[in-house]
Amino acid sequence: MVSKKVLVLSASPRKGGNSDLLCDQFMLGAEEAGHQAEKIFLRDKEINYCMACDSCQMNGGICDQDDDMAEVLDKMIAADVIVLATPVYFYTMNAQMKTLIDRTYSRYAAIQNKDFYFITTAAVRNKQALERTIEGFRGFNSVLSGANEKGIIYGTGAWKIGDIKGTKAMDQAYEMGKMV
């Protein structure tokens, strides 16, 4: 087995929040299977909104904004596997995740041939309520060359920090990590 680079992008605004706990389970499984896993906690990064100035398209993919996005984007391009994890707010991904996706514009064409896993959490118990978020992730993947959706974890019924513990989603996250 070849060791893969797994990049987990956690958009939870709460350290130890439910989607973040699922990220940790995914990473545990991936690491136990012999892969390298790194988690970027988006709340700890300065990632500004895309200004739609298009200067990056005239500057060889270099954004004019001086923030942490270039570092995150380099890691996305270098990864073999990318995990997009977000709590669901008003039936879609949160602002941190959407801002990250928008800011890939400068070099999205270089995010090629990646396996993707999606982790979503919500207070609602109905996984269909999370489908708009999944469709948002799929919209992003649809513009990436060779993007391969490998799995989805629906963490439903999780409102307060820790509600996800002991659920089927925790086991699924661990098992998906192992199967990377």
Image (tube, grey):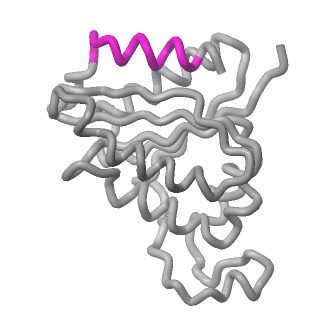
From this view, report whether residue 101 is shown above or below residue 162: below
| Residue at figure coordinates x 67%, y 50% from the top left | 76
How many numbered marks are there? 0
Q: Quadrant of residue 3?
A: top right
Q: Quadrant of the N terminus?
A: top right
| Residue at figure coordinates x 35%, y 47% from the top left | 133
Q: Is residue 7 visible?
A: no
From this view, report whether residue 19 is shown above or below residue 105: above
From this view, report whether residue 76 is shown above or below residue 79: below
Numbered range of the magenta stretch: 165-177
50 lies left or right of 153: right
Q: Quadrant of the C terminus?
A: top right
Give the x, y percent position of residue 165. 27, 16
**Does the stretch in magenta take in 147?**
no
Give the x, y percent position of residue 67. 56, 71
Relative to the observer, which residue lies in front, 51 or 152?
Answer: 152
| Residue at figure coordinates x 57%, y 19% from the top left | 177
Q: Quadrant of residue 49?
A: bottom left
Q: Is residue 75 visible?
A: yes
Give the x, y percent position of residue 32. 64, 11
From this view, report whether residue 90 is shown above or below residue 61: above
175 lies left or right of 60: left
- Main SS of the magenta part reads helix
Give the x, y percent position of residue 92. 29, 51
